[in-house]
Amino acid sequence: MDSAHHWQNVFMNWPVGMPKTGLLVTTCQEPFGFRDFQVLGGLLYMERDRPDSFGARKVLLSFETISAIKLTDTRDLAADVEMGFGG
C-alpha cells in the first residue's frame, strides 16, 4: 500500500476535538503551516496559516506529495487512535 493512502486515512480520520493545524512538508521539501483542511477524493485542500510569497492562502495538493506532517497539539499519543494509530 502506498503512502498516499495512509496520508489520506490520517486526514479523513482526523479527531473531532483536535485542531486542524500543523506543519506540512511536501516531497519537494516545501514546508508550510496550515490552519484548516478538507479532503476531496485524492486531494487535500488546505488553508495556510499565512500567505506564501505570491499571496496564496489556499493550497490543493495530492496525497502523493506529502512527505511529513508536524503537529503542535500536545495530546497524549494514545488519543490519536482515532487517526488509525495504536499500540
Image (cartoon, rainbow, N blue to C red):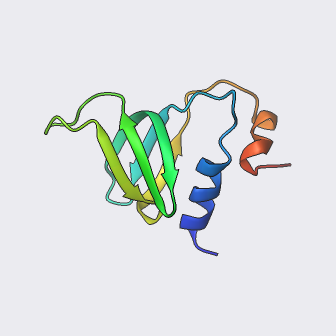
Instruction: Tell me where residue 72 appears, x and y as whole percent.
Output: 55, 28
Q: Position of residue 71 (x, y in %)?
A: 56, 34
- Relative vertical location of residue 8 with respect to residue 54 in this rendering, above or below: below
The residue at the point 33 percent across, 53 percent down is 29
Residue 50 lies, in percent from the top left, at: 29, 28
Which residue is located at x 51 percent, y 51 percent? 39
Q: Is residue 47 left or right of residue 21?
A: left
For the N terminus, the quadrant is bottom right
Q: Position of residue 15 (x, y in %)?
A: 70, 37
Position of 60 relative to 46 (above/below): below
Taking the spot 24% from the left edge, 31% from the top edge, the residue there is 51
Which residue sits at x=80%, y=43%?
81
Q: Residue furthest toward the front?
A: 40
Q: Nearer the viewer, residue 36 or 29?
A: 36
Residue 57 is left or right of residue 24, and the answer is left
Does 47 sit above or below residue 43?
above
Q: In the figure, residue 5 lies in which quadrant?
A: bottom right
